[in-house]
Image (cartoon, rainbow, N blue to C red):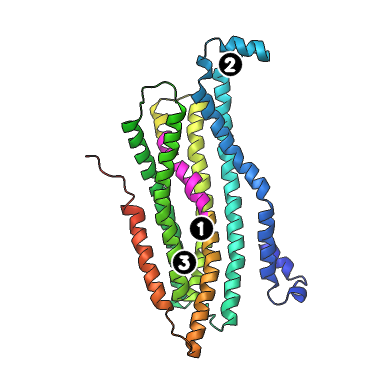
Amino acid sequence: MAGAYWVSGMGLGEVMGTHASVFAFGLVAFGFLCMGPVNIAVDSYGPVTDNAQSVFELAQTEHIPGIKEEIKRDFGFDPDFTLGKHYLEANDSAGNTFKATAKPVLIGTAVVGATTMIFSIILLLDKAKMLALNLTDAPVLLGFICGGAVIYWFCGASMQAVTTGAYRAVEFIKKNMDLTKKEADLEDSITVVRICTQYAQAGMWNIFIVLLTITLAFAFFDPNFFVAYLISIAVFGLFQAIYMANAGGAWDNAKKYVEVDLKEKGTELHAATVVGDTVGDPFKDTTSVALNPIIKFSTLFGLLAVEIAIKIKEAAHTGTSSDYTAIVGVFMLAIALVFVWRSFYAMRIPPKI
């Protein structure tokens, strides 16, 4: 983005006008989006290696009678299942690194695109003679604080939803499924996918409603406050997503290092890394990934909300209507706070009776 700003000062202003740098930022965002196929390929490598290892473990091919002779006869080599499992686990570790590398690029596309849309809101406010962005103004400072608060609330709420959903899924499986079976069947797999989906959706609704209503509330309260809020969620979200993607990958790979290189599976050291992986998986596979659409949704939906708020204020200024933006903002904020409470207290793991 710094390079785009520098290039925009080399005559681009004569073509694009006084806001050539904004156009340059838009080109950077477009360039990021053009890397989509590469990002998808890199990010898909991790799930493929992870699933390959899971398929190998669930298939239990090495226990099939006469399988070694059959593979030797049909494919011409002697299978080494122990070494094959070692390679699959090592490849899964590489897949974690690939995923941790691709996710920051995706969050970078959200931040660059959000920057361009934030400039659009600023120009919209400037055109309406409502622009008052000053660091000494209380609404601007409060907007910066609220943006960071929403990012950290979202991180906590999404991880709480994953933790509670996993607990409920395990409790359901322990009560309703036969865990003495040595082989999984299709019906069990369908049941597990169904209950995990249900619990994931239960946590998703709280978060989605909060983000929807709080974006409307802040946009209707004060557009300048809302601009500061959007800048804050972009900055906080960028560094938080990068940190969580890298930390989650490190926790997952620590477990793989103990299993593959140290061969300490089943020890207390391995148990400690498994506990760390239960934190790392929500870090890298839930929260860091979800921050990408959160930033995009808030800025895109916020742009529309700010334009509506400006039209209402202009109509009130001309006397053709009343300014009811504050009433709508308070109502939406009240709904958001209710679901913020639900995202934690309604999603807590219930005590065992």
Main SS of residues in magenta: helix
Q: Quadrant of the N terminus?
A: bottom right
Dot 2 falls on a residue whose secondary structure is loop
Tell me the magenta residue range.
273-291
Asked whether residue 321 appears in the rendered view, the answer is yes
Q: Which residue is mark 1?
A: 294
- Tell me, for residue 80, which label it has, or none: 2
Q: Is mark 3 in CB contact (under 8 Å) with mark 2?
A: no
Dot 1 falls on a residue whose secondary structure is helix
What amino acid is at disc 2?
Asp
51 or 318, nearer to the observer: 318
Q: Quadrant of the C terminus?
A: top left
In the image, what residue occupies the spot 35% across and 40% down?
168
In the image, what residue occupies the spot 39% across and 40% down?
166
Asked whether residue 78 appears in the rendered view, the answer is no
**Separation of marks 3 and 2 at Cα, in angstroms:** 56 Å
335 or 39, nearer to the observer: 335
Q: Is 25 positioned to the left or the right of 337 in the image?
A: right
